[in-house]
Amino acid sequence: MSENATQHPPRPSARAERNPVADLFSATGRLKAVPRKPARRDQLLRHLAETLFEPDRDYTEPEVNGALLSVHDDSAALRRYLVIAGLLTRTRDGGSYRRATLPA
């Protein structure tokens, strides 16, 4: 092992620094798999909430499903994970969804 390698750990790529879940997606932007580890899945869900849904806007279930289908075939599972994580909430009437306010 070279002396340089021991002094300087490899830096993550610029893409990984901007998007810590980038490795979960294929080159075409499709999600390869939903992570099993809760912390990693939470990172993914936060990313999906931030990138697919606008704050202060109501979405019908078909709109939510369409947005999630753009990245993965199991939109129902992703929608359920988002709701359980508190990142997507159902409106009082139960007819639509809204992105929750995300903590910084």
Image (cartoon, rainbow, N blue to C red):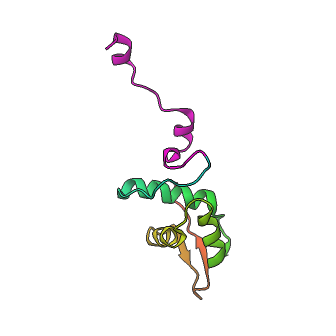
Confirm whether residue 44 shows in the render. Answer: yes
Residue 16 spot, x, y in % from top left: 52, 39
Task: Please provide percent x and percent y for residue 40.
Answer: 40, 53
Query: Is residue 69 covered in magenta?
Result: no
Q: Quadrant of residue 68?
A: bottom right
Residue placed furthest toward the top: 3
Q: Is residue 60 visible?
A: no
Residue 94, quarter of picture: bottom right
* Residue 7 to residue 104: above or below: above
Q: Position of residue 36 (x, y in %)?
A: 36, 58
Count of picture labels = 0
Q: Is residue 79 left or right of residue 55?
A: left
**73 horizontally vs 55: left or right:** left
Q: Which quadrant of the figure contains the N terminus?
A: top left
Q: Residue at x 56, y 61 (%)?
A: 49
> What residue lies at 63% left-to-right and 65% top-to-bottom?
67
Observer-nearest of 76 and 44: 76
As drawn, is 44 to the left or to the right of 39? right
53 w.r.t. 98: above or below: above
Give the residues in magenta: 1-27
- Residue extending farthest to the bottom is 93
**Nearer the observer, 94 or 79:** 79
Residue at figure coordinates x 38%, y 55% from the top left: 39
At x 59% / y 58%, what residue is drawn? 50
